[in-house]
Image (tube, rainbow, N blue to C red):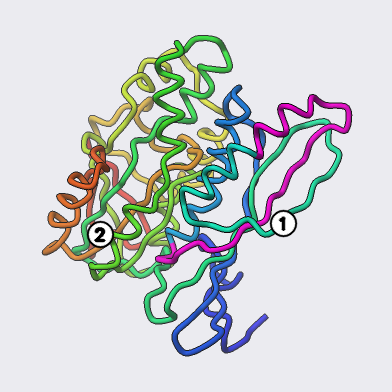
Amino acid sequence: MKHPDLLVGMDKPDDAGVYRISDDTALILTLDFFTPVVDDPYLFGQIAVTNALSDVYAMGGKPLLAMNIICFPQDGDVSILQEILRGGYDKMMEAGVLLVGGHSVDDSEIKYGLSVTGTVHPDRILKNAGSQAGDRLILTKPVGTGIISTAIKADMADAALEARVASYMNTLNRIPAELMEGFDVHACTDVTGFGLLGHACEMIEGSDVGMTIHASCVPVIQEAFEFARMGLIPAGAYRNEKYRENSVLKRDGVSDDTMKILFDPQTSGGLLISLPPARAGELLKMLHEAGVTEAALIGEITKGHPGRIIVEA
């Protein structure tokens, strides 16, 4: 549906919808929920909220209001439900987001997430498209959480690794979003279910630019390489790779396991930021100083191979 105030809608996939309500304010609208990715219900609540808020940060906005979405069995342990909601509420408080209500349904499979409303200036919306040739690409969190979550479900990851992976998924993308405001960012997205390369494809799909990703520069949770070699790869990684097989070209020196990691579906992943080369180093330095220590420059936007990604070693 076309409307002059619908600034980001369903005509092109993006991280959230955006609707202008005045000359200087637009609403960002998004919704996300999923099944538990960790055993701890409090931590699951926090991760689900972190993931849902990320879409607003990726659009250059500030999340303001949220509504809970909860699916829980009627005969389930109410203390688990309470812990999920408490974890989510605490994370909303950390983000400065007000909980204004929600809805629950009886479901044999637990699911939790949020409907989120945020704001952004209509002239400062960040879309996943808009990268320009020469731009550098910054990724703010390491990848590999999907593979390691698979290993956790198979009881092959120790408690320390599980806690470390959960801490990545539990970290708001607020700091990178706030730091981006001082830079001429051309495009941004958050890395979630389509994996790093899947979301990167969306950034250049149908455009006149291409992308080069340097696999050795991508921050990866190192244990993911070991588990990938063992075949502990989620089905979503294979689906992501198959779907984008005509859009991604792997150069010699890049292993198949590395490609699986780059296609690994992430939960509450980092931001992928495209900005001019002159200031990319400055933003990266600021991210590191602000505690986003694993942020890295991972590639660039190119004039060649429009609409395609080249993955180099």
Looking at the image, tell me whether mark 2 or mark 1 is earlier in sequence order.
1
Find disc 1 in the rendering and name its residue: 101
Distance in Å between CA atoms under marks 2 and 1:
42 Å
Q: Quadrant of the C terminus?
A: top left
Q: Amino acid at mark 1?
A: Gly
**Compared with residue 191, is residue 283 higher up or lower down, i.e. above or below?**
below
Image coordinates of residue 261 in percent, x first then y, are 40, 31
**Residue found 29% across the figure and 55% down from its top:** 211
56 drawn magenta: no
Image coordinates of residue 78 in percent, x first then y, are 78, 29
Q: Nearer the viewer, mark 2 or mark 1?
A: 1
Most foreground residue, 247 or 165: 165
**Residue found 65% across the figure and 35% down from its top:** 84
Image coordinates of residue 173 in percent, x first then y, are 39, 50
Most foreground residue, 235 or 24: 24
Q: Quadrant of the N terminus?
A: bottom right
Most foreground residue, 238 or 304: 238
**Residue found 54% across the figure and 38% down from its top:** 46
Horizontal side of 193 relative to 84 (left or right) equals left
Find disc 2 in the rendering and name its residue: 301
Q: Which residues are magenta?
A: 59-85
Q: Secondary structure at mark 2?
A: strand
Residue 122 badge: none
